[in-house]
Image (cartoon, helix red, strand yellow):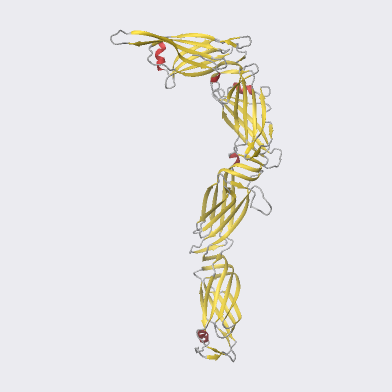
């Protein structure tokens, strides 16, 4: 087996060769042994590539050609997801603007025959006579039934129009008509017509308000005067009549039990303020989240709620939804709850379009209309009936636009796994020096101050931690705002170098950490500059480290391992192994070899420990030629080889003298 550093000239190379004895027996022949040629059986190596298993590690050279490992790693990429979550509720309460009932119309007539009969006169049909003056004629009482329209209503306002057609052959004067409730006999209207000429129609319009009206009413013409025709004669037609028409219209009730027509019962236009200070935002896009509309109603009728929220758009289409709310029953509220996915919606926070006082900030504009349908059922409604609606938002923005305010965001402590030393299975080392470059990128459209609260290295296997100390910790690092053009963000950045003189960096690296913990604080607009900006949830501030590790160190049993596949026919029955070890490192090495079965378990030690001297170095400490060690392994281990699938090489390095640091070239 050979261990060799590719293109570094530094390696431990191990070759296992085998002089193979195989047996064969031909028919009618005695058994005999044949000796095969000596050939390499296993070839393996341990070199710097055993350290470079992490794609973030690359190799460089210092001016003196010594090797340096360069480790690039994004130690913290800050995404403001939960930190930007907005949970907001907007509350709306609406009472009914109006309750409009359908117009009611009814007519009745009084014939000339009925008029004469009320005075005890016969009606002589076809007779031509003059009509004498007659006063104080009382008309009939007529029932007015509006049950097909309503049962009862508490009227706020309305109009009753009374039309009387005089179809009699003579004028009538001082015609008085009243309309009253049957239940309580209260007069609804009383109206008088001074004169209604023959064969003409006269009308009076009466405003009514603040009264209770029942469906069962009585209309009565209380007085009719006939001024007479003088010497003129008229032809008597007993079928001639007076026709009175009552039109009850424009009814607005505070409460009514009625057959309601389809109508809007309330409309609400509202601007609501988002509680997201100190930010003053004009727009944000929603990455994910939902809106819950919860509505309750006391109305005993089916109602439609039409929500229009121009502030929410998806593909430039404003949010709109029509929801049906069942009737309230038995004094219980009717309840509606509906969820809507708002992902990818854009929220305009400038308020109502073309608002009188110009655009605003942090403001959502909504329109809510309540409608009732014509159901054909008798339903009681009251202007005191109310509808409450709650819009609950739970959203995570994808981006913000506007002034972000002076705000503080704390992140971490967050843990990141690193693979820089994962190939080292045991041992320790002491570095000569080390350097870390910290690159901080600001993708936020606002000035920021970044404060590194903590960077802690952890070796979880040995339960060792070291926390970075130095002036970089808890200091304010100012970075100017990023810019955006055509949806492309150009960050501003700050580069900081941390070395052994300004920190205890070397202590962090020497524990060979497999994890880092970072805690960071970001302050937006620390100087209070009030200018438009932006913030994307996944592009805020990221921290990247470039760590330079010179291979100049003291090692104490620093141990690496490598596994190689064994590939030969299992008909080998005997042979001698020869182990050739070449060491091109300037460090003494101890080597162990283990056989591994198909299950991945170690089942035999081929070489428990062999010390291999360091490579031969010149006055500059550079290896000029490797040392070679040859070890014989005898045939009693051949059966174990037949059962092995892999061989594991374990190499530990110890620098001698122990206090001297060596360089790798």
Q: Is residue 58 visible?
A: yes
Q: Is residue 95 visible?
A: no
Q: Which residue is nearer to you in this view: 608 or 56?
A: 56
Tally of marks? 0
Residue 596 position (above or below residue 517): above
Residue 290 is situated, as x and y percent measured from the top left of the image, at 55, 46
Residue 295 position (above or below residue 155): above
Residue 576 is situated, as x and y percent measured from the top left of the image, at 42, 9
Residue extending farthest left: 28
Residue 149 is situated, as x and y percent measured from the top left of the image, at 51, 68
Instruction: Report the residue at 60% width, 80% height from top.
Output: 193
Residue 18 is situated, as x and y percent measured from the top left of the image, at 43, 11
Residue 614 position (above or below residue 155): above
Image quadrant occupied by the C terminus: top right
Q: Which residue is nearer to you in this view: 255 or 310?
A: 310
Instruction: Report the residue at 68% width, 22% height from top.
Output: 501
Instruction: Report the residue at 40% width, 12% height from top.
Output: 638
């Amino acid at each position: 087996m050979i261990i060799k550093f590719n293109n570094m000239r530094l390696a431990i190379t191990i070759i296992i060769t085998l002089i193979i004895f195989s047996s064969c027996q031909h028919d009618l022949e005695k058994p005999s042994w044949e000796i095969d040629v000596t050939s390499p059986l296993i070839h393996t190596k341990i070199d710097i590539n055993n350290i470079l298993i992490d794609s973030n590690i690359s190799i460089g050279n210092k001016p003196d050609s010594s090797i340096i490992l360069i480790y690039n790693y994004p130690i913290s990429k800050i995404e403001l997801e939960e930190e930007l979550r907005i949970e907001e509720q907007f509350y709306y309460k609406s009472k009914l603007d109006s309750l409009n009932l359908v117009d009611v119309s009814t007519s009745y007539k009084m014939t000339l025959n009925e008029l004469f009969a009320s005075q005890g006169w016969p009606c002589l049909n076809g007779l031509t006579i003059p009509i004498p003056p007659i006063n104080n004629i009382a008309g009939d009482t007529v029932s007015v039934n509006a049950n097909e329209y309503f049962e009862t209503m508490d009227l706020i306002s309305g109009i009753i129009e009374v039309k009387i057609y005089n179809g009699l052959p003579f004028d009538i004067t001082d015609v008085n008509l009243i309309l009253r409730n049957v239940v309580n006999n209260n007069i609804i209207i009383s109206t008088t017509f001074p004169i209604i000429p023959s064969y003409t129609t006269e009308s009076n319009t009466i405003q009514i308000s603040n009264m209770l009206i029942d469906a069962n009413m009585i209309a009565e013409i209380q007085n009719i005067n006939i001024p007479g025709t003088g010497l003129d004669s008229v032809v008597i037609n007993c079928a001639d009549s007076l026709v009175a028409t009552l039109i009850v219209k424009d009814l607005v009730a505070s409460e009514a039990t009625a057959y309601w027509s389809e109508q809007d019962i309330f409309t609400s236009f509202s601007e609501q303020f988002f509680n997201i200070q100190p930010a003053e935002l004009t727009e944000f896009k929603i990455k994910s989240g939902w809106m819950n509309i919860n509505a309750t109603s006391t109305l005993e009728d089916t109602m439609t709620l039409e929500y229009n929220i121009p502030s929410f758009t998806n593909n430039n289409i404003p949010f709109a939804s029509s929801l049906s709310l069942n009737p309230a029953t038995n004094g219980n509220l009717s309840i509606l709850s509906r969820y809507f996915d708002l992902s990818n919606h854009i929220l305009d926070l400038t308020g109502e379009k073309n608002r009188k006082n110009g655009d605003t900030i942090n403001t959502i504009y909504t329109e809510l209309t309540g409608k009732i349908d014509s159901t054909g059922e008798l339903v009681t409604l009251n202007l005191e009936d109310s509808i409450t609606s709650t819009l609950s938002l739970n959203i995570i923005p994808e981006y913000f636009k506007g002034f972000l305010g002076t705000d503080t965001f704390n992140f971490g402590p967050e843990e990141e796994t690193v693979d820089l030393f994962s190939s080292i299975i045991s041992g320790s080392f002491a570095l000569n020096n080390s350097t870390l470059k910290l690159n901080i990128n600001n993708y936020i459209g606002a000035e920021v101050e970044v404060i590194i609260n903590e960077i802690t290295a952890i070796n979880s296997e040995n339960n060792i931690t070291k926390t970075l100390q130095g002036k970089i910790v808890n200091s304010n690092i100012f970075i100017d705002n990023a810019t955006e053009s055509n949806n492309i963000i150009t960050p501003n950045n700050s580069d900081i170098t941390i070395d052994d003189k300004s920190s205890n960096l070397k202590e962090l690296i020497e524990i060979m950490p497999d994890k880092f913990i970072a805690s960071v604080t970001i302050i937006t607009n620390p100087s209070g500059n009030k200018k438009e900006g932006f913030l994307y949830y996944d592009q805020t501030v990221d921290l990247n480290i470039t760590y330079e590790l010179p291979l100049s160190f003291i090692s104490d049993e620093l141990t690496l391992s490598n596994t190689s596949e064994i590939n030969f026919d299992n008909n080998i029955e005997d042979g001698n192994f020869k182990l050739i070890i070449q060491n091109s490192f300037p460090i003494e090495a101890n080597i162990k070899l283990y056989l591994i079965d198909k299950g991945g378990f170690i089942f035999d030690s081929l070489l428990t420990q062999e010390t291999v001297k360091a490579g031969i170095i010149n006055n500059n400490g550079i290896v000029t030629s490797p040392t070679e060690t040859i070890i014989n392994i005898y045939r009693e281990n051949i059966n174990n080889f037949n059962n092995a699938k892999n061989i594991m090489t374990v190499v530990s390095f110890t620098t001698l003298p122990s206090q001297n640091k060596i360089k790798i070239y």
